[in-house]
């Protein structure tokens, strides 16, 4: 209580994904130079089938990020009517290409192509997205392998504030294969007690109110509001949505939750930049392993 008889509320500290990315990318650049001195340039192949506008932006950003950090990258663009067999043949060739250390097929692929078949065709040694069953299995049993970039980036954000997960209760909202499920496993591996909530969870608020750490990865605005957050909790917002005014926003009611949380990731400028950064890290590590 302060002198006016009210409980003072401290506004949460932002975890700045732009600044953390810049710092991590500096390290990627330094290690890339060291590898180049030994005659190896880390190489990423990005495959895009069709002309999905969002995918075009994503792949352009990935290729640019590689160039900025000194990695080699190739962007292969194919017409929407490319056959599944042709795509699988191209992946097979890239699997055997010694200049390529990471292969990424931008999702979604056109409906006539089986995305699972495509993901499983990528060599696990080059699966820098971490989507292959072998990568998922390695994460599940705690063996070395590539971690999916977005939850991996969230872990780096927690690490950046020196957060000790041991003994803490982490609540993940969302059970996608790309974020929610691997996120829960990473938190578990770091000794948190983990609750994985999803669309069929009956009392989400009762779960989130117990949480020391909350990761929101649903893809819907205002999934997490201030009344659902324990004072002092750390809140990671993976969402990328638009508000009615067309402004980019996350899954978390940022204005409300920042008055309750101790740390929070903003949108934009939070988890978003971390995803591509971890892709660079995975590609570099793949190249280092090949050396
Ligand atoms: N589509 C949306 N996000 C991703 C991603 O992280 N990797 C791939 N391959 N496709 C995506």
Image (cartoon, rainbow, N blue to C red):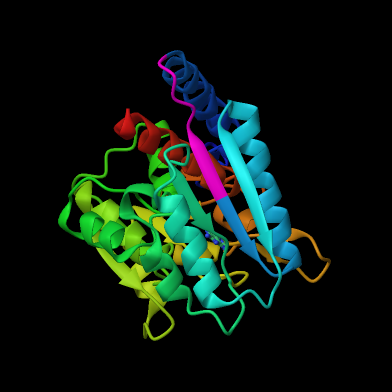
**Residue 282 position by quadrant:** top left
Magenta region includes residue 265: no
Classify residue 187 as left or right of residue 92. Answer: left
Q: Is residue 202 above or below residue 209?
A: below
Q: Nearer the viewer, residue 24 or 92?
A: 92
The boundaries of the magenta stretch are 38-45
Q: Is residue 126 above or below residue 185?
A: above
Q: Residue at x 39, y 65 (%)?
A: 121
* Front-most of residues 113 and 237: 113
Residue 39 shown in magenta:
yes
Picture coordinates of residue 68 (x, y %)? 65, 29
Q: Quadrant of ligand 1?
A: bottom right
Residue ID at (63%, 37%): 65
Image position of 59 with respect to 263: above or below: below
187 to 171, vertically: above or below: above
Q: Which residue reaches farthest right?
A: 245
- The answer to whether residue 88 is left or right of residue 125 is right
Residue 39 screen position, x and y as percent: 44, 19
Closest to the observer: 260 or 111? 111
Q: Nearer the viewer, residue 45 or 209?
A: 45
Point out residue 106 in the picture as x, y percentages from the top left corner: 57, 61
Classify residue 118 as left or right of residue 105. left
Residue sitting at 36 percent across and 67 percent down? 120
Q: Residue at x 37, y 53 (%)?
A: 213
Position in image of residue 140 (x %, y %): 21, 60
Please name the predominant secondary structure of the magenta segment in the image. loop
Q: Quadrant of residue 119?
A: bottom left
Q: Is residue 224 visible?
A: no
């Amino acid at each position: 209580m302060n002198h006016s008889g009210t409980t003072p509320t401290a506004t949460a500290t932002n975890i700045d994904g732009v600044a953390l990315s810049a710092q991590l990318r500096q390290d990627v650049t330094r290690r890339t130079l060291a590898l180049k001195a030994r005659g190896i340039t880390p190489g990423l192949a990005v495959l895009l089938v069709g002309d999905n506008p969002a995918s075009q932006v994503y792949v352009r950003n990935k290729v640019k990020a590689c160039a900025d950090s000194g990695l080699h990258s190739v962007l292969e663009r194919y017409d929407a009517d490319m056959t599944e067999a042709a795509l699988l043949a191209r992946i097979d060739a890239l699997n055997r290409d010694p200049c390529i250390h990471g292969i990424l097929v931008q999702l979604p692929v056109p409906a006539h192509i089986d995305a699972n078949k495509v993901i499983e065709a990528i060599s696990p040694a080059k699966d820098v997205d971490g989507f292959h069953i072998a990568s998922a299995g390695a994460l599940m049993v705690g063996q070395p392998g590539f971690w999916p970039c977005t939850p991996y980036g969230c872990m780096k954000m927690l690490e950046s504030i020196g957060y000790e997960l041991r003994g803490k209760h982490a609540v993940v909202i969302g059970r996608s294969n790309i974020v929610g499920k691997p996120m829960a496993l990473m938190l578990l591996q770091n000794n948190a007690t983990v609750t994985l909530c999803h669309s069929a969870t009956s009392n989400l608020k009762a779960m989130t109110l117990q949480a020391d750490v909350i990761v929101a990865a649903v893809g819907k605005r205002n999934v997490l509001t201030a009344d659902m957050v324990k004072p002092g909790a750390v809140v990671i917002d993976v969402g990328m949505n638009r508000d009615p005014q067309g402004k980019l926003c996350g899954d978390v009611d940022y204005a409300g939750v920042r008055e309750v949380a101790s740390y929070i990731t903003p949108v934009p400028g939070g988890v978003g930049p971390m995803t591509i950064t971890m892709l660079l890290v995975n590609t570099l590590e793949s190249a280092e392993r090949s050396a």
